Amino acid sequence: MSFKERLGKELLIFDGAMGTILQKNGLVAGELPELWNFKNGELISEIHKQYIEAGADIITTNTFGANSLKLDGSGYSVDGVVKKACSLARKAADEADKKVYVALDMGPTGKLLEPYGDLPFEKAYELYKEQILAGKDCGVDFVLLETMGDLYEIKAAVLAAKENCELPIVVSMIFNEKGQLLTGADIKTAVFTLEGLGVDGIGLNCGLGPKQMKDFVGEVLKYTSLPLTVNPNAGLPECVNGVTSYNVLPEEFSDDMAQIVRMGASAVGGCCGTTPEHIKATAKKCRNIAVCPVNKKHFTAVTSYSKTVIMGGKPIIIGERINPTGKKKLKEALRNNDLDYIVSEAVAQADKNSDVLDVNVGLPEIDEAEMLSKAVRRVQSVVNLPLQIDTANASALEKALRIYNGKPLINSVNGKEESMNAVFPLAKKYGGVTVCLTLDENGIPETAEGRIEIAEKIIAKAESYGISKDNLIFDTLTLTVSTGSDNAKITLDALDYIRHTLGVNTVLGVSNISFGLPSRESINTAFFTMALQRGLSAGIVNPLSEDMMNAYYSYCALAGFDDNCENYIRSIVKTQAAETAESISLKQAIIKGMNTQSATLAKELLKSADALEIINSEIIPALDEVGQGFENGTVFLPQLLQSADCAKAAFDEIKFSLSSSGKKQETKGRIVLCTVKGDIHDIGKNIVKVLLENYGFDVIDLGKDVAPETVLKAVIDNGVRLVGLSALMTTTVVSMQETIDLLKRELGDITVCVGGAVLNQEYADSIGADFYSKDAMGTVRFCEKFFTEN
Amino acid sequence: MELRLSEILRYSGFRSHEPDELTLKKIEQLEDEILGSVTPKSIYREFGVRALENGVEINGVKFLSEALKKNLSGCDKVLLYCCTLGIESDVILRKYGATDSSKFVLAQAIFTEMCEAYSDEITEKLAAEYLKNGLYLNPRFSVGYGDLALEYQREFFKLLEITKRIGVTLNDECMMTPSKSVTAFIGITKDQPCERKTCEICDKTDCQFRKR
């Protein structure tokens, strides 16, 4: 029987540590254990044999770190190391007098993936692909990803395995004593994300001893519908004289492992510090325990890289604001590639207790596939809420699903064959909960029964793709009540039936109900409350609307979802008499750092004054006063920036008003800005950017860790003559010099100003910079001078 | 963990000047947010250390640096230490980087103070343990200080198995992610070291963050 056929049906015993035994034989700290496949292949074979004799049904190849990053400079190739390790393990397995499976072992890359670290997702994918291609035809029975600590890296590895071989995949993760992965995911988040990706087994290994792992075994079993593998260390590490040792002895270890099998683990073995004796004792005590059947669980859950939202209990809020329909400012931002605006909308909605954020960037004039992935990445880098990927474009959907970190909501599929055939294969491959609209080739049925019929059709079709109704959520479509007095009733009758009779969760975009009516919030809140009462699992609403959120908090308190009304009391927005606004000028508001007031005052002023007048008589004088204070040492950086943000808020209003009337704000000049290659410090660069924009310059921000060639290209593409470079480390000033050299060599007529903690005038001169600025205001002054003179 | 307001203000560029009320309020809000979502983690391991002509040797790895040699003079053992505030700290920085520049600078300052305060807390505990055996701990000395080249981070990371144990990684230029992470040598000595030196040992005397 194959590994997959047996996993979960009968107990399988894994082997124990490899590295621990190699250390006893002379492997030193920092040496690559994988090279021992060549250096001492007999020892590796011997270790495999010892584990098989001890009772292991599964042995793992000595390839944990055999990726091209770690092997770089070792003189060995990934292909060579993996093939050699597989042949050693396969031979040992074949020589056994029972069936022994060989696991193609892979660990973390050793790098953190973007956006947290510097390894691109696709590069991580390539690293795993290389290992899999090397090992897949060498007689291995399954792919074992172990000691994994980052869900995003796991996703890259699982996709690499699924797209390059047919082998079953088991993913075993390392949790800390708080039950979190290195990148913050808790156990249920990891379980739901991995199940979404369609792996064959979930595991826990390393990090903890069997005693500490028991609690987490229970937690995994509460959520997973997959077989569980458990490979703890021989206790917690103890460090004596620089040597780490694990001191739980085989007797005690195996007692705990027997308990773990009784709890429901399907396969057990050991990690660091375990020996053939540990495995022998474990096999002896566990072999006769009947394994618990693997039970199917029923959760409708979506995840981010660290957080889970489960539907079906307390209703959830899906923030609707990142969707350009009817939103001029967002449209403008998308056209200008202004992802910061999208981030600010995401943060604002997260601050107002959204559970999930919708991301829709569909505009006819932009490349949606490109922009959707960019927006999803960017939002995920600042907000830890799960996202709803919202697009009608199948290629945009696939691209975004591929790079999404977690298990998203997918918006949407409908009852048309074409739609289901496009969306369900993607949902199956990447995981996700799919929003299903109850319409089909014949349009939106006018009766609840008609919509229910479509729902039943979609459920059946999803099932045929291997997608259970747990991973569907139905939208029975809100049509405005102004065009049909039964519209709300039809929607809610269908919703009620689907939720309570078909047993599937539901979602509605709420505000459509009031389209064409006055005082829309009144109808919206009433309809929202009615829908919640009839079984709405998730409302797509504007979380910045106080009325909607108050209706939601009230419903939750009344429906028993809020113990002691705690959340209601904490979150309800009290309708207060308008605050008596202190009369203050825009200039003063900016100087004092009053952000909201600055925007409001600018808006007010625009009614009576023109844009240029406001800029020249209010904003620029305010900035000058604060800027001078900074230069004189009476105003300090956070205060300078506070005013800068206020000026930005005022400028945004002005820009918006100008663009609405078809005009464009004049720019004082364009500058390309970045932190140089290798340097990941962007604080200084960001401050300079904020101030330059304040003073009316157009900044092309290339970000951090930017290669010289990228700077050159941006300069040429944008016809720019001034470049600002930042570096914080002595080691990266070298890249600064390389960038300057390249620009001067290729373009000749280009001015470069530099800044950063390690620089001074002398240093800047020596690398050929045209100007050195000791702080951000200095750069502003230099740019003013440059563009006046040139 | 006690965060020192004076240090937060120093790191955010106030030097010894009084901050305004709005800044203080923002610091307070940020501290609440940060202390609620960021948990520092650390690891350390003791090694033997041997002086070389132009540096030191730890577990077979040579660190060529006069400054480190001087820092560890008289020590036959050394602790290798690493702490990190985790990726959550970078997420918060990115958030304010895009939405609120003054909070961004203040959050940077709070994180820096958090690394320091946390490391102090850990080293004080360790110092108390070592004192029981009549041993003292030197001030922390990080890779990149003085003439100790940043490239030694790679060897340091391998010795302490940092990536595997607490998830801090190095990029090609030897910078750490999560960015709010600290590595340091802490010498173990039989002689009571002189009073702890801080940033006044640095050569960059025109630094605007220098303690005065």
Image: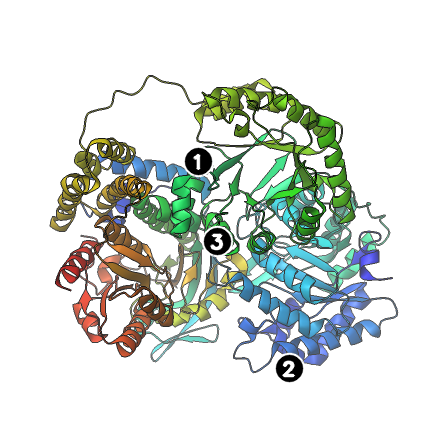
- Say whether disc 1 or disc 3 marks the residue closer to the N-terminus: 1
Distance of label 1 from label 3 (alpha carbons) = 24 Å
- Under circle 3, the secondary element is helix
**Which image quadrant is residue A535 in?**
top right
| Residue ID for mark 3 | A371
- Under circle 1, the secondary element is helix
Query: Between residues A194 and A501, which one lies in front from this camera angle?
Result: A501
Q: Are marks 3 and 2 on the same chain?
A: yes
Q: Residues within 10 Å of mark 2 (few under 14, many from 20)?
A: few
Residue, x 51% and y 51% (percent of image)? A372
Residue A562: in sight, yes or no? no
- Residue A119 placed where, x, y %? 50, 63
- Residue A211 placed where, x, y %? 67, 48
On the rendered image, what quadrant is the C terminus of chain A found in? bottom left
Distance of label 2 from label 1 (alpha carbons) = 56 Å
Q: Is residue A260 above or below residue B29?
A: below
Q: Is residue A434 above or below residue A752?
A: above
| Residue ID for mark 1 | A351
- Disc 3 + disc 2, Cβ < 8 Å: no
Query: Between residues A370 and A190, which one lies in front from this camera angle?
Result: A370
The chain letter under disc 2 is A
Distance of label 3 from label 2 (alpha carbons) = 50 Å
| Residue ID for mark 2 | A39
Q: Residues within 10 Å of mark 3 (few under 14, many from 20)?
A: many
- Under circle 2, the secondary element is helix
The chain letter under disc 1 is A
Type of amino acid at the residue the image marks with label 2: Lys
Type of amino acid at the residue the image marks with label 1: Asp
